[in-house]
Image (cartoon, helix red, strand yellow):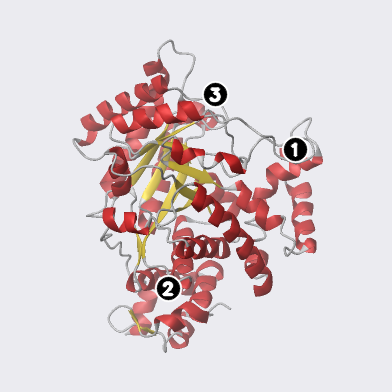
Amino acid sequence: MTFASVQELVQGTRPVLDFNGGLRIKDSSALRSETIDRLVHTAVFGEGDVREVARWVIWEAGWEVGVKSASIDSLYQARAREEYANLTVPAMNVRAMAYDFARAIVASAKRRDVGAFIFELARSEMGYTNQSCEEFATVMMAASIKEGHAGPIFIQGDHYQADAKKYATDPQGVIDGLKKLIREAIAAGYGNIDIDTSTLVKLSFPTLAEQQRENYERCVEQAALIRELEPRGVTSSIGGEIGEVGKKNSTVDELEAFIQGFNSAFRARVGDKRGLSKISVNTGSSHGGVVLPDGTIAKVAIDFDTLREMSAAARRYGMGGAVQHGASTLPPEYFHKFPEVGTLEVHLATEFQNIILDHGAFPEDLKQQTYAYIREKLRDEWASGDTEEQFIYKTRKKIWGPFKQQTWTLPEATRSAIRALLMEKLDFLYEQLGVVNSQSLIQRHIPDAKRISKPQPEALKAIAA
């Protein structure tokens, strides 16, 4: 499936691609068939020069056929101005079987005329799924090419989070790590980054401003770096966060304490540049849901009234609204409420993983291999008092890196069946969140995304010449 060398890649794609003086598409239909499949497998599982060349080719080919990695900030500014309503943008964490899952996201969006959707990957997910920023952006672009998407796509770094425990002993090391990650994301072509320094909130202080100070000051540092590094003509969407998901519920007063402090410090540092596009809050959800002893998910209550109030407050400060995390495992009847209360964006992850792993087409022998890996390699993460079902459910997200090649190379019939069920779920979510027929909204507010170019690899220059 992969190209073995740069020479083989150039020769094997010659009927489809022309490398003379850059990259030109000769046959876009042929590109979307086996060619893009071979290129993306090389971009992920190849090594050295051929992997880097495959990544560059996919990125450039995407722009050539009209797939444009963009910032969603212009849309969110329009929401702040009340130019649209009753729409919540879904952000899908593509941690499992990334190419097939991303294909399902795009295919479902295309058949429902959805333009407002986000591909995202959290900092923690990068590690246990073995996906770098460059790989992730490449795979999202490849999936969009494969499914015939045209227009902007939104690639987002989710939860670029400061580790509170490490920060206590090495604050500068933690901040430098976040800055390194931001540099990698922007170089990879991300147009959207969510900063999460909410872990640094200190509830022991008497006033909300003091409680939020470390959060907003460190968030300002990261946001200023994004503004410094973003490509000319691009205003990246930047998110902040006021309450760690799964902890206590956020309040409007906390939001205002954070954003007032952030805006003052940000203006002092960078002047009148665009600040935050959105703010993540906690309203009762938790990442992955609350797992019961039998491995099922408890039904939780979301404080929609508070979510409404915080979204309205965020818009008063020029942001598009509040963001809801940890939503994918919520009861189906909740989802229509998010656009009703003005939620700007909702993050969805674990339920898609559940659909894949629990699908009847997913090979049982492979599933048992992954569970054996969990029992052997992750036993130290088994919390005291948890049943085995709870332990496996909480940790099975960490199988996607070690078993990436096995799941990517499942038979097409298996992957097609899984994509079909993912698309059913996506169809439902797009409908409930109000993004069906949103392509025209994207075209109105993001009509001409600025091209984000990457340097051509020297190994390709040598052969193409």
Question: Residue 140 placed where, x, y %?
Answer: 47, 62
- Distance Cα–Cα, label 3 vs label 1: 24 Å
Q: Would you name the residue on which mark 1 appears?
A: 382
Question: Residue 241 placed where, x, y %?
Answer: 43, 33
Residue beneath the point at 40% across and 42% down: 86
Mark 3 surroundings within 10 Å by alpha-carbon count, few (fewer than 14), some (14 through 19), many (20 or more): few
Residue beneath the point at 56% across and 39% down: 334
- Distance Cα–Cα, label 2 vs label 3: 47 Å
Q: Earlier in the sequence, mark 3 or mark 1?
A: 3
Q: Would you name the residue on which mark 2 appears?
A: 53
In this orientation, which residue lies closer to the viewer: 223 or 109? Answer: 109
Amino acid marked by disc 2: Val
Q: Nearer the viewer, mark 2 or mark 1?
A: 1
SS for tag 2? helix
Amino acid marked by disc 1: Trp
Question: Residue 246 placed where, x, y %?
Answer: 58, 31
In this orientation, which residue lies closer to the viewer: 103 or 61? Answer: 103
Left or right of residue 272: residue 413: right
Q: Can you tell which mark lies on residue 248? A: 3
Question: Residue 188 placed where, x, y %?
Answer: 39, 58
Quadrant of res 80: top left
- Which residue is at the far top? 206
Is the C-beta separation of discs 2 and 3 under 8 Å? no
Quadrant of res 423: bottom right
Q: Can you tell which mark lies on residue 433? A: none
- Distance Cα–Cα, label 2 vs label 1: 41 Å
Amino acid marked by disc 3: Lys
Q: Above or below — where is 396 with respect to 189?
A: above
